[in-house]
């Protein structure tokens, strides 16, 4: 029932995309092929798809937990950065060490880093009732400035010719690959685990139920005695922790170091993924793949169609807009029901 | 154009075969009625009979799907409320359409066409309010007005447009008995001046007292017309619901048991800047009795309920004692553990989650009855509970998987009440138990409360319907301006005394020559 | 600090605050009708690129401003349809608009990244501009600065002294009551939203055509969000929006303060750049603590969809 609107939105987005290609003077069918087919035309491409989808899955499931309870963590981008920074700090501190402990500590640091950054809006909301959307978003800008300062200064590679980046991480600080043929790494396993855990939490646990009630009818949640403060903390920290973990998986994965471009707008793309997936972990799996395809398609478009790669963002924005517009079908159903009561 | 002679004979308003169909219900079917000049015409029916929908069409808020309307002899299609007003139709809504952050003059101005001068308007308001006995201060912000005063603003707003037809939708649900008398005087004065009045209500005694003619609606259809003064409440009731009005069995209470709820010097500042602060409330409710609290809406009932349920705990734990346990600071789940059950006045959105199924809604408070294992939900147990609730409490629905918002008001209320009762509370607090509920379900609910009392539960009922309280309470008190009156046994008082108390005047002696009602 | 430095700081503060005033006042009107449009950042970005591109091609900065206004309004129209007619969730839709606007503007703006516009001269008001210290900052400014003051005065009058303003406030408090009396609540919300979008577009065009006459992806840098926070901080009152905008403007040009004070402190530029965002958080906390004032002044129906019955 409610899965009709994501499908409708995708179709509309495709139509919009074809129109866009035409407006830009490109052959729409060629544009479609380059953007949507090229990236996954071989096995390596498919692995890249999963690689790009991994951080999206992680973040989106964490955000979905909060969104279900009407806790709007919009600052995942900043939490990802902080997770990457924390994990990098551990990697650089241990850059002379070997052993599994490095990676384990990095994972923990990444999660904690993201959670710490999410603690700020959680605290301000529970204590002062400050709007978490604006606070978490402002902290994104602060996080970006923070990482900029770090890689221009304290964390800069001393042998790096003054480029704003950290040392490259040693092998002990990199996530092990799942295969020799491609770049997929352990983070993908984390992502699947997170999706499973998210599913059980949201649909089978009582706390997950409480959060759903809080999202649907906050007066009913209060009437039932469900602690609103607890939901706010859980909602924000789950997104923060997952985003931090995603940040760690970026610096300890394909990037192998800390730079200003820790994130490729993943924090915001994950919000779209969560929505398109209707906050459902199964949907998040597929929506992440779709979003990853949009990213890869942009890169292909840049190479083969001479279009700026930011065309990905246009597709992403269109997808979300169409999804929200398609929800009219759900709304009509709700309105219909209200007339009977 | 009607000639002068016709004007004396043509009805002011005629409806022929009006039908209105919504996607899932036929709100009005082939309704016809006729209102003469200067006539007070009742539209009688229980909740859900289609009265409000009919009025909306007369006032232009909705459009009929079939049928025609004649105004002073001419066929007319009312496009919108502004059009209705220009024809001379005024409407006083049941749920006021006033703006709290604006003052009285601004509120009235918004309902008038053009851009009236506010100073001049204030003068006109004062003049009209004096003429019809509806005192109100034009400069006051509406949020500072009592419910009765707000209704006066609504009425004055209509009167300033010299209406020829005034529609009053359930006007007395928010008034004390004394205020109701005053309103009736105003309405009679208007009728004598030639204004027709459509009076919507389900209160048979009021209609008998005030109205010349009555049209009865049931399930969207007209089931009869009558002259109220020639009928008995019984005959009108049978026209209204099609069968005998059920009367709950209310025997005298048995042995009174221990104190289950104690309020000691309960005081609380309202969280709402427009609310009423509670002051120094003292109260006891014992096992085996029903204590009713009467009062006009807006006198602190909301705040009292939030404090009792734990949705807004107070700082003094000892101010509220549940089964001997100081509970003032506890949140609702703790209070339920202490033995309290709570049925709020808002069903959808507070007592139940509209979008969720009845099974999920059962989980809301019944989770403590063994539904959880290591924090995980046991769906089969919860399903069984919901099923039992539906069966035992006669809830008409498509099944426990159906969403709460697919039930009618009465059935949802039965479900919520059933859910709380199945948890075997030692203390049950109920707010507005039968508001907006059809007569059959209302009688069922009241009987359930009485049966529960007989089994030893202490029950506190807060309601704005005096008749209901007099039907089921053993003892009764009044809340006014955040303070609680002394508590009296039902047999020691009467509706008129309680009516006086509803204005806060319990320190005065009872009115001389007061006649006990029924 | 000598007077010329004070003067420069005031000047820069006013300029920096101007786009915030314009955008926030537009937001204020939309919110007064009950519509919460979180897409301000995206609308500003589209206004910026539209203004820049049209100015570049036409040579006329005022055409650019008009283009910016149109772009902002067009974006807000998308939002209005999704939220007012299709009844989608306002928070999610506003976010979507921001993402779309920022992404679309980056895409359209790619070819313009190396272009520079000629600077537009300020409009000097004779005599008044010669006043010491405040003369230059107040009376030798860009036309849009004077516009922002006129906008403030106009909106204050509109809201509290005009009939349409009264109707707007009524709709914001209770669209269902307004509807019952016969006002077209949805239409009024549409108009208010479009106005907000137009103002956001002008604010964005100001940035790219007058403030720093070039185009860079992400140049709006969160000003749209700050404008939204500003409306909350000002508890929906126009004068407070004015004051707040200049306070933020001052924080944004903090670097000048540091330099002008003559102190030899080595503060990393990133820290100074982070100040406006941190300041936004601080003011939000301050205002949220006073829940009573917020409740008394916030439009009651803010963010809630209104479904008129058939």
Image (spheres, coloured by chain):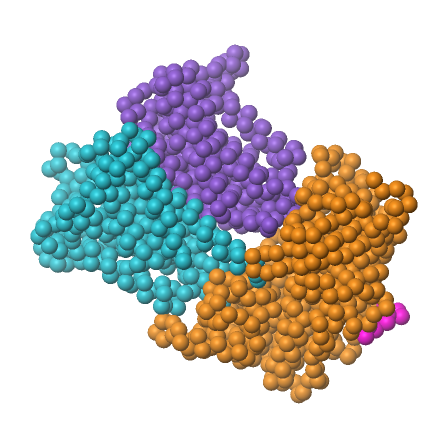
Chain colours: A cyan, B orange, C purple
State left or right for residue B307 relative to residue B111.
left
Residue A288 in the image: above or below residue B453: above
Residue C37 seen in the current view: no
Q: Residue at x 37, y 39 (%)?
A: C100
At x 38%, y 16%, the residue is C59
Give the prevailing secondary structure in the magenta stretch.
Answer: loop
Image x and y of residue A57, in percent: 27, 53
Name the side, left or right, on which A337 lies relative to A51. right
Q: In the picture, residue B124 is in which quadrant?
A: top right
Q: Residue at x 53, y 78 (%)?
A: B391
For the C terminus of chain B, the image quarter is bottom right
Q: Is residue B205 visible?
A: yes
B459 lies left or right of B230: left
Residue situated in front as seen by the camera: C265 or B14: B14
Image quarter hosting the N terminus of chain B? top right
Q: Which residue range is magenta in the image? A: B511-518
Q: In which image quadrant can residue C118 be found?
A: top left
The verdict on residue A51 being magenta is no
Residue at (29, 63) in percent of width and height: A197
**Residue B81 at x, y percent in the picture:** 69, 45
Q: Is residue A209 above or below residue C301?
A: below
Q: Which of these two is toward me, C66 or B226?
A: B226
* Spot occupied by residue B42 in the image (x, y as percentages of width and height): 78, 60
Outermost residue toward the bottom in this view: B255
Query: Is B147 in front, or is A26?
Result: A26
- Which of the 4 quarters of the picture holds residue B40? bottom right
């Amino acid at each position: 029932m409610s899965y009709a609107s994501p499908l409708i939105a995708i179709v509309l987005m495709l139509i919009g995309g074809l129109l866009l290609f035409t407006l830009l003077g490109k052959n729409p069918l060629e544009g479609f092929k380059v953007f949507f087919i090229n990236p996954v035309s071989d096995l390596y491409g498919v692995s890249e798809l999963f690689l790009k989808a991994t951080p999206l899955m992680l973040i989106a499931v964490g955000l979905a937990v909060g969104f279900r309870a009407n806790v709007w963590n919009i600052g995942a981008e900043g939490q990802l950065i902080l997770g990457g920074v924390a994990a990098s700090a551990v990697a650089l501190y241990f850059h002379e060490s070997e052993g599994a402990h490095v990676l384990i500590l990095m994972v923990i640091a990444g999660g904690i880093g993201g959670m710490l950054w999410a603690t700020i809006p959680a605290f301000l909301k529970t204590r002062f009732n400050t709007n978490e959307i604006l606070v978490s978003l402002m902290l994104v800008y602060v996080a970006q400035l923070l990482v900029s300062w770090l890689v221009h200064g304290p964390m800069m590679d001393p042998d790096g010719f003054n480029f704003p980046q950290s040392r490259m991480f040693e092998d002990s600080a990199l996530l092990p690959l799942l295969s020799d043929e491609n770049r997929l790494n352990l983070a993908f396993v984390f992502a699947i685990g997170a999706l499973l855990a998210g599913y059980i939490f949201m649909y089978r646990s009582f706390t997950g139920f409480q959060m759903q009630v809080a999202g649907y009818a906050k007066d009913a949640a209060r009437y039932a005695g469900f602690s609103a403060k607890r939901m706010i903390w859980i909602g924000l920290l789950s997104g923060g922790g997952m985003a931090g973990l995603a940040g760690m998986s970026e610096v300890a994965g394909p990037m192998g170091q800390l730079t200003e471009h820790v994130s490729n707008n993943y924090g915001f793309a994950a919000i779209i993924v969560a929505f398109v997936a209707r906050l459902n972990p199964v949907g998040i799996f597929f929506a992440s793949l779709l979003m990853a395809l949009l990213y890869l398609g942009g890169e292909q478009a840049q190479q083969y169609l001479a279009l700026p790669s930011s065309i990905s963002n246009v597709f992403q924005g269109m997808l979300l807009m169409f999804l929200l517009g398609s929800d009219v079908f759900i709304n009509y159903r709700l309105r219909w029901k209200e007339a009977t009561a | 154009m009607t000639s002068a002679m016709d004007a004396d004979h043509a009805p002011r308003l005629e409806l022929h075969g009006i039908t209105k169909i919504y996607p899932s219900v036929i709100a009005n079917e082939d309704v016809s009625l006729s209102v003469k000049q200067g006539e007070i015409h009742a539209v009688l029916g229980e909740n859900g009979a289609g009265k409000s929908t009919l009025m909306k069409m007369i006032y232009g808020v909705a459009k009929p799907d079939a049928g025609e309307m004649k105004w002073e002899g001419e066929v007319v299609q009312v496009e919108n409320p502004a059009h209705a007003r220009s024809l001379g139709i005024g409407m006083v809504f049941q749920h006021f359409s006033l703006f709290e952050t604006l003052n009285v003059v601004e509120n009235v101005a918004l309902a008038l066409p053009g851009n009236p001068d506010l100073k001049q308007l204030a003068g006109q308001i004062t003049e009209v309010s004096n003429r019809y006995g509806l005192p109100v201060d034009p400069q006051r912000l509406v949020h500072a007005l009592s419910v009765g005063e707000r209704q006066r603003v609504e009425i004055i707003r209509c009167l300033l447009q010299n209406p020829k037809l005034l529609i009053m939708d359930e006007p007395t649900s928010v008034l004390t008995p004394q205020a109701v008398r005053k309103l009736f005087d105003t309405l009679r004065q208007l009728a004598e001046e030639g204004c027709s009045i459509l009076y919507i209500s389900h209160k048979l005694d009021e209609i008998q007292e005030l109205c010349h003619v009555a049209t009865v609606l049931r399930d969207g259809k007209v089931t009869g017309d009558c002259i109220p003064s020639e009928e008995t409440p019984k005959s009108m009731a049978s026209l209204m619901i099609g069968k005998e009005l059920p009367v709950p069995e209310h025997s005298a209470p048995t042995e009174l048991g221990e104190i289950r709820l104690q309020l000691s010097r309960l005081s609380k500042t309202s969280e709402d800047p427009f609310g009423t602060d509670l002051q120094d409330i003292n109260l006891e409710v014992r096992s085996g009795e029903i204590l009713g609290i009467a009062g006009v809406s807006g006198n602190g009932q909301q705040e009292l309920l939030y404090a009792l349920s734990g949705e807004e705990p107070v700082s003094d734990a000892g101010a509220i004692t549940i089964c001997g346990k100081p509970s003032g600071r506890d949140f609702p789940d703790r209070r339920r553990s202490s033995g309290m059950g709570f049925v709020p006045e808002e069903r959808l959105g507070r007592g139940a989650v509209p979008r969720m199924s009845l099974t999920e809604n059962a989980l809301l408070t019944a989770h403590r009855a063994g539904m959880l294992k290591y924090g995980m939900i046991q769906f089969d147990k919860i399903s069984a509970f919901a099923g039992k609730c539906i069966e035992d409490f006669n809830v008409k629905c498509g099944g426990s998987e159906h969403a709460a918002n697919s039930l009618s008001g009465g059935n949802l209320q039965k479900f919520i009440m059933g859910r709380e009762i199945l948890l075997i509370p030692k203390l049950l607090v109920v707010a507005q138990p039968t508001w907006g509920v059809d007569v059959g379900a209302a009688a069922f609910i009241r009987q359930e409360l009485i049966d529960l009392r007989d089994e030893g539960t202490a029950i506190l009922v807060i309601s704005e319907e005096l008749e209901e309280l007099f039907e089921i309470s053993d003892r009764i008190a009044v809340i006014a301006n955040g303070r609680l009156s002394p508590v009296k046994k039902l047999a020691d008082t009467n509706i008129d005394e309680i009516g006086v108390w509803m204005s806060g005047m319990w320190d005065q002696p009872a009115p001389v020559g007061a006649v006990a009602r029924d | 600090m000598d007077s010329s430095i004070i003067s420069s700081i005031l000047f820069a503060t006013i300029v920096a605050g101007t786009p915030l005033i314009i955008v926030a006042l537009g937001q204020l009107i939309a919110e007064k009708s009950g519509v919460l449009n979180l897409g301000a950042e995206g609308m500003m970005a589209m206004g910026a690129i539209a203004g820049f591109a049209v100015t570049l091609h036409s040579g006329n900065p005022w055409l650019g401003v008009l283009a910016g206004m149109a772009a902002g309004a067009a974006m807000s129209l998308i939002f209005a349809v999704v939220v007012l007619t299709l009844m989608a969730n306002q928070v999610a839709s506003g976010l979507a608009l921001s993402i779309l606007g920022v992404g679309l503007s980056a895409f359209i703006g790619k070819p313009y990244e190396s272009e520079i516009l000629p600077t537009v001269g300020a409009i000097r008001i004779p005599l008044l501009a010669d006043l010491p210290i405040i003369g230059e900052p107040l009376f030798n400014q860009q036309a849009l600065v004077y516009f922002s003051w006129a906008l403030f005065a106009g909106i204050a009058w509109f809201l509290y002294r005009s009939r349409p303003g009264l109707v707007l406030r009524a709709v914001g408090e209770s669209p269902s009551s307004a509807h019952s009396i016969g006002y077209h609540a949805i239409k009024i919300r549409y108009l208010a939203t479009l106005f907000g979008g137009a103002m956001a577009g002008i604010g964005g065009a100001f940035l790219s055509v007058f403030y720093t006459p070039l185009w860079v992806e992400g140049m709006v840098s969160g000003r749209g969000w700050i404008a939204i926070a500003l409306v909350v901080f000002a508890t929906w009152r126009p004068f407070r929006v004015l004051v707040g905008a200049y306070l933020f403007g001052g924080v944004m040009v903090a670097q000048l303060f540091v330099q002008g004070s003559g102190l030899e402190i080595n503060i990393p530029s990133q820290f100074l750049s982070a100040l406006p965002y941190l300041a936004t958080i601080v003011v939000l906390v301050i205002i949220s603590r006073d829940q009573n004032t917020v409740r008394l002044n916030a439009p009651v129906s803010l963010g809630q969809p209104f479904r008129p019955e058939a």
